[in-house]
Amino acid sequence: MNKKFVAALLSVAVVSGAFSTSAFAAREAGDWIARVGMTNLDPKQKAGEIYGTGTALDGAGITVDEDTAVSITGAYMFTPNLGLELQVSTPFEHDISVAGEQFGSTQLLPPTLNVQWHFNPAGQFHPYVGAGINYTLFFSQKFPIAGLELDDTVGYDLQVGVDFELSDNLLLNFDVRYFDLAPDLKRNGTKIATVALDPVTVGINLGWKF
């Protein structure tokens, strides 16, 4: 698993322990939490190898660069500890390289639905973990070889985050997610590679509780 995600897990554990006795702006069943901010999506560097193009690129490695987009989340608290969150964003745009040379580009949208557990609903710090399902749409794809496209894909995600209450209704949020994201690369409908992106996202958001 990505080192950034492991580090985030450890950070949340430390924060949870340090502030578990705080009393500030308690979470309650029926609360809604809306957040807006910036999220960086960083695929792992070794994304796969491409075969079946009938060109000198066969067998060359694929890499995909990172991008940052505006993210929006909405969460509903069923209990002070248990919540359901939907995250959407503006499109991420990624350059795709093969054998170290730019080969194409794509935009993607990764709407994600997570179940969350909040550890410290009565404190000023609200650390939480989450897990859920992600549907990633690829569009505006540009490749120099006709018929190439990345398939939309479904996968799981894991999440850690923390809300810091600035007032009874205003909060600052930090959020890290790991995505199981491995779309097929197809040419004229035939799979020629699996692009194992498996990105980590890191977000900072301003939120409102109501």
Image (tube, rainbow, N blue to C red):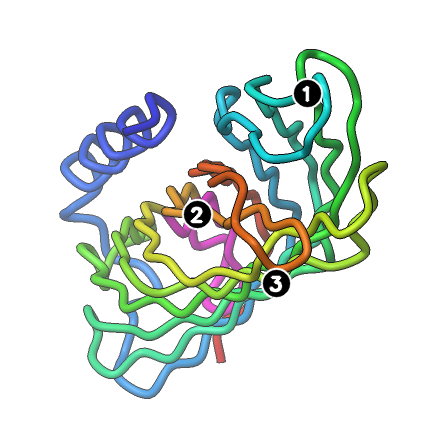
In this figure, which residue is indicated by the disc labeled 1? Answer: 57
Q: CA distance from mark 2 to mark 1?
A: 23 Å
Give the residue at x 67% y 13%.
99
In this figure, which residue is indicated by the disc labeled 2? Answer: 181
Can residue 207 be seen here? The reply is: no
* Mark 2 or mark 1, earlier in chain: 1
Assign a secondary structure to mark 3. strand
Q: Residues within 10 Å of mark 3 (few under 14, many from 20)?
A: some
Q: Residues within 10 Å of mark 1 (few under 14, many from 20)?
A: some
Assign a secondary structure to mark 1. loop
In this view, 198 is above or below 120: above
* Mark 3 or mark 1, earlier in chain: 1
Magenta residues, as a range?
Answer: 162-175
In this figure, which residue is indicated by the disc labeled 3? Answer: 137
State the image coordinates of residue 169 (x, y, percent, origin top left).
Answer: 50, 69
Q: Amino acid at mark 2?
A: Leu
**Who is closer to the viewer here, 80 or 106?**
106
- Residues marked 3 and 2 touching at CB (< 8 Å): no
Give the residue at x 61% y 44%.
39
Q: Which mark is residue 82?
A: none
Q: Amino acid at mark 1?
A: Leu
Say left or right for 53 vs 200. Answer: right
Q: Residues within 10 Å of mark 2 (few under 14, many from 20)?
A: many
